[in-house]
Amino acid sequence: MSAQAWVPLAVVASSLLPGLIIFLLPEDRRGLRATLNLAGAFAKLALVGLMLWNVGRFQDYEARMTVLPGLDLVLRADELSLLFMSLSALLWLLTTVYAIGYLEDSPHRSRFFGFFSLCVSATAGIALAGNLFTLFVFYEILTLVTYPLVIHRGTPAALAAGRTYLFYTVPAGALLLLAVVASQVLTGPQDFVGAGYLKPFAEEHATTLVLLFVALIAGFGVKAALVPLHGWLPLAMVAPAPVSALLHAVAVVKAGAFAIVRVVYEVFGVEFAATLGVLTPLAVVASVTILYGSLRALMQDELKKRLAYSTVSQVSYIVLGTALLGPIATIGALVHLVHQGLMKITLFFSAGNYAETLGVHHVSEMDGIGRRMPWTTAAFTVGALGMIGVPPVAGFVSKLYLGAGAAQAGQWWAIGVLAASSLLNAMYFLPVLHRAWFRPQNGPWPHEDGRGRDAKPMLLLPVLLTALFSLGVGVLATMPWSPLEWAHLIMRKEYVGG
Amino acid sequence: MTGSAALVTVLAVPLAGAAAALLVGRRGAAVVGLLTSALGVVAAFALAAHVFAGGLQRVAVGGWAVPLGMELRADGLATAMLLMTAVIGAGISVYAWRYFGADDHHDRHVHPVGPSGSGSTQWLFWPVWLLAWGALNALYLSGDLFNLYVTLELLGLAAVALVALAGAGAAAAALRYLLFALLGSMLYILGVELLYAAHQTLDLLQLRERLQPGVSVWLAAALMSTGLLVKTAIFPLHVWLPPAHGSAPAPVSAALSALVVKAGFYLLARLWLDLFGSLPGASVAPLLLGALGAGAVLWGGVQALRQTRLKAMIAYSTVAQLGYLMIALPLAGRVTDGAMHAAVLLAASHAAAKASMFMCAGSLLAAYGHDRIDALTGFGTRLPITATAFALAAISLVGLPPTGGFVGKFALVEAAVRADAWWAVAVVLLGSLLAAAFLFHALSRAFVEAPADTASARVARAPQLVALALALLAVALVAAGEPLRHLLAAGAAN
Amino acid sequence: MSLALLYGLAGIALVAMGLYAALAARHVLRRLLGLNVLGSGVFMMLVALASRASDSAGRPDPVPHAMVLTGIVVAVSATALALALLRRMHAHDGSPRLPEDRDDASDGPSP
């Protein structure tokens, strides 16, 4: 196997192997477990760095295996893979640190970290998938390995959440199977291609292609929490905070959005999709999701549920950007993939800190928490401001591009949606910030952990780092290695004629 | 070893082993069983190597040429089935060795042991199991219709005996199975008679050339098919299967569900794709079989969902999975076709996964003293090896990656889409959803915290490891697509 | 009417009767007998076949005879096994009928 083939495989293996070993470890081997986890995370980061360095110089990394006649499993590192992959690798490292701190002394840690690692491997597979079949395979594997994380606590609520999760994702998988088979029968073996490969089939198979699009978007849309397929997400909040962080920022929801990006840009091609007439409906669905998510978020007192609905809303920014025809919108969508991840994980880490340190789960309990946990709340503030779109946090950059993209595409109503959403974001985040910083504490904390200070170091460090990154990618957006510049690079491949 | 020698060895080893086990008696039966299994695996792989390299292998028994004599033939399909039987059979042997070798503990919870006691006759498992294995091999290798009858009978009797081994309480289930099997054989033989009367030969290849359409041929085909449907638990004639499983010890259930029932599918495929395929209007029968298969998938799935006991649920799952195999028949044109490829892959993955799952059920039964699904709480912590095996096997049965079941299902759906058979697509997808429902429900028990007072007996590790090994095999079969295709093509009869 | 034809028709009649008994009877022994009669019918048909296909010297075709002999052996073994199981079932369940054919009043305790 050439060097170029083993690197993508190693990226997947860097979390798979530690994960499998961790399953076999007894509960009390925390040192070994932490070492394996962190070693894997650093290894993955290093490999991703290697690929970033070399793909910049146009070196091809690809690993391929034939499963059935005409059907290959392909792992390939192109610019889009690496965008998602870098986000995953970085956030996995931070979430691992966080999870180690959060789950200290809770039961079944080996099982948890085992599945945790497998989850990241599956996400790596999704990121590096070189064709629709591979994307589908790892997508289904992701469902399988996240289920045990959702039901980790084993309580009736957790089991019910797990059941709902499967209830949504398994039929979606069946729909995807049909779509992938149909596309395979239609086109034969075909890898992802910048600007898509379905255009030649337009004449004879237009209706089939539209159906295919709907099936693929619906199938992937379940994980991406497109309305009305989002129902599983708020329920999944019953899982421990590191799981929520992972699910929302790094793995599941992001994977759904990423898959939709791949389908629109590299299976259909965004310009062809526009001529097929499917982009506008997609934009509408995305807009409905954006607004619905924000409205539901307003109504939630439970902090994690509020953040869950916020995710539903924010991830659809990516879908909206994808559905608007035009390079600027594309850049907005791609860059928001990264930015939303960073900001949302900051928010979830903060929520976890509040829960762990003070037993605070609801917004109504958060009065004066800024005084008690200033650093966590500072991070929370950065994340929240980013979500609203306040410069110079990352969210501002994405919204700017999305708005400009909408204008470029001539879809002025989309700007209205973005504006309304920002307003709603402000409405459900600013009061929280106000309570946290400016209101006095209105009663004892539900569960004072006696430390008297902010969250433990292992919980505090990750959240500060992600907040810093959220700020950094916004401030330094124009620097050569920023996500924004990377998004520019990818965009050029997706439009015919560069 | 030449190809013919390998062929004969594959046939002789289990039969000789059965005789030897019987002669050796209680003390040595298990050892003989294990040795025979190992040799059986070697022989099967040797034969497969020959078929890969040299194509169809044939042996004229006794040197007499067809049509007076009989031929034993190993083409790609037969070889694939032989390999599957050998590998999974070996796994079942190892499992049975540890399962029976440990104390009688395991059986006592399932059914009250009669005065004869299962302890004193347990060793008879070995000769009977090896006989069944031998019968399966003979069946796959037979090139002659009447020889097929003999092997079917042998298989049927051995299988009935396996079920009856559990004790007096299983006599009713075994008897029911036997009556069904006898009826099926009689119908089958009637059909063979009609064919012989019309064409003066019993050899499959010769018959294929000489076949003339006519009433008697159609009648014969109908009789033979019905006989086979009865014998192999294809819906709606499947009713003997679930009770037989319920009473049987885990190794027997594994052997029945994973291996014995596949013979029926194989024969129906041979008959309708090879033999009767050239008849005008012959596509009706596979379509009918496919419809029955669809019924099996849906009925079996729904029934499995309704079961409260684990072994019954797994048994109904077998009914459903056989349905997938039947659905492949109308989609396939020839034995080497894409749909048959899918079916064989599904059959092999199912065999591995189902055997593993019954083994897991055996361990769970031993640990909890019962197999009520809802009460099997916390088995993830109690029996982690079993839980892992069960999970992997379940994933393969549902058809999710990264397992052989997934590749088989994908190939089957692809064949259906290519043939524009949208009914088949819908049924296969629905079947997976049903399977996901009842399997994940059972699996979720693993994660629930068990109440502290739940009694739990210690369970031997070795049987669990065998279950895990077979489940891992089901996963490993994800890579079997290409090699299998080569095997099927290499051994093509023409 | 030739002898072969007579045998053949008798065979068909036996098949029909045996099939009926095998399916409709409730007592297992009756079912078994039905299956045996069914088998006999099948064998008679085979023998008729052999006679019909005789060669120019009037010797019957030996292949169907071989089939009949094999069939008889198989039928005997299977019947023996069935009888042994029947005895066991009767001793254990108290009834000579399969569970689905029992009504609780007339037979012994069902399991």
Image (spheres, rainbow, N blue to C red):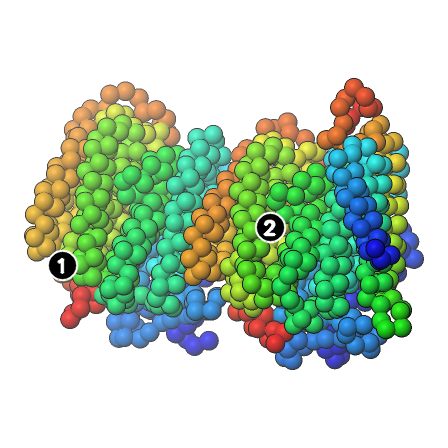
Residue that numbered label 2 is attached to: B322
The front one of A33 and B418 is: B418
Q: Residue at x 62, y 66 (%)?
A: B274
Q: Which amino acid type corresponds to the residue marked 1 in the rendered image?
A: Gly
| Marks 2 and 1 on same chain | no
Residue that numbered label 1 is attached to: A326
User: Residue placed farthest to the front in the image?
Assistant: C1
Tell me the subunit letter for badge 2: B
- Residue A208 appears in the rendering: yes
Q: Residue at x 44, y 33 (%)?
A: A160
Q: Residue at x 80, y 42 (%)?
A: C18
Question: Could you tell me residue A120's position as x and y percent?
Answer: 40, 53
The front one of A370 and B353 is: B353
Q: Is residue A346 left or right of residue B344?
A: left
Q: Which amino acid type corresponds to the residue marked 2 in the rendered image?
A: Leu
Tell me how many marks there are.
Answer: 2
Dot 2: what SS?
helix
Q: Is residue B211 above or below residue A460?
A: below
Disc 1 crowd, CA 10 A, few/some/many (<14, 14-19, 20+)? many
Residue A382's mark? none
Disc 2 crowd, CA 10 A, few/some/many (<14, 14-19, 20+)? many
Tell me the subunit letter for badge 1: A
- Residue A46 appears in the rendering: no
